[in-house]
Image (spheres, grey):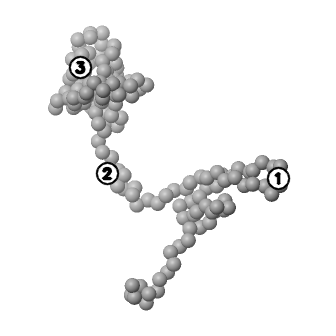
Amino acid sequence: MPHIQLTPAQRKVHRADAHHLDPVVMVGNDGLTANVKKEIDGALNAHGLIKVRVFSDDRVAREAMFQTLADELSAAPIQHIGKLLVLWRPQPDVAKEKALDEDRMAGPRDFKVLKYSKRAGQRPEVKTLRVLGNQRLTAGGNVKRAKPKPQVSVKKRSQT
């Protein structure tokens, strides 16, 4: 597959994003083996933007590796500086994983509540309250259970 073509502005943004990254994959003396390509492919799927360190002193060989990786893994070559190669590929959609969690309700939430004293000179007391999914926090700082839906009789349901 051919590598992804990016505009210079897009490449500049990815270079800036990759600045703080550490190399994820190291290419040793054996060069680009099938296992190394598999690891780089997995890292691109997981992270999207990765750095690869090549332990070779031959600059021409590193440039060839850079282009080979970009072509075979359908990634965009972002930067080759020294022994570091930066590659980018858009991450695959994770909508399948999120679809499983749509049924879940909200989990517990923590709120900080200020309770003011009736005496004028004292500081307000800060309390951290945990509100569960079936509870709500009132204006006075109390935790109450959520109101259940009122039951409707069969007769009223049939009338509507």
The mark closer to the camera, 1 or 3, is 1
The mark closer to the camera, 1 or 2, is 1
Q: Which residue is mark 3?
A: 65
Residue located farthest toward the left when viewing the structure as drawn: 1
Q: Residue at x 24, y 16 (%)?
A: 63
Query: Which residue is at the front of the view, 104 or 33?
Result: 104
Q: Quadrant of the N terminus?
A: top left
Q: Are marks 1 and 2 in contact (CB under 8 Å)?
A: no
Residue 39 on image: x %, y %: 30, 31
Q: Residues within 10 Å of mark 2 (few under 14, many from 20)?
A: few
Label number found at residue 120: 1
Which of the two discs, 1 and 2, labels the residue nearer the N terminus?
2
Up/down of 50 relative to 138, above or below = above
Q: Say what amino acid the circle numbered 2 marks.
A: Lys
Residue located farthest toward the bottom when viewing the structure as drawn: 155
3D distance between C-alphas at marks 1 and 3 = 73 Å
Q: How many marks?
A: 3
3D distance between C-alphas at marks 3 and 2 = 34 Å
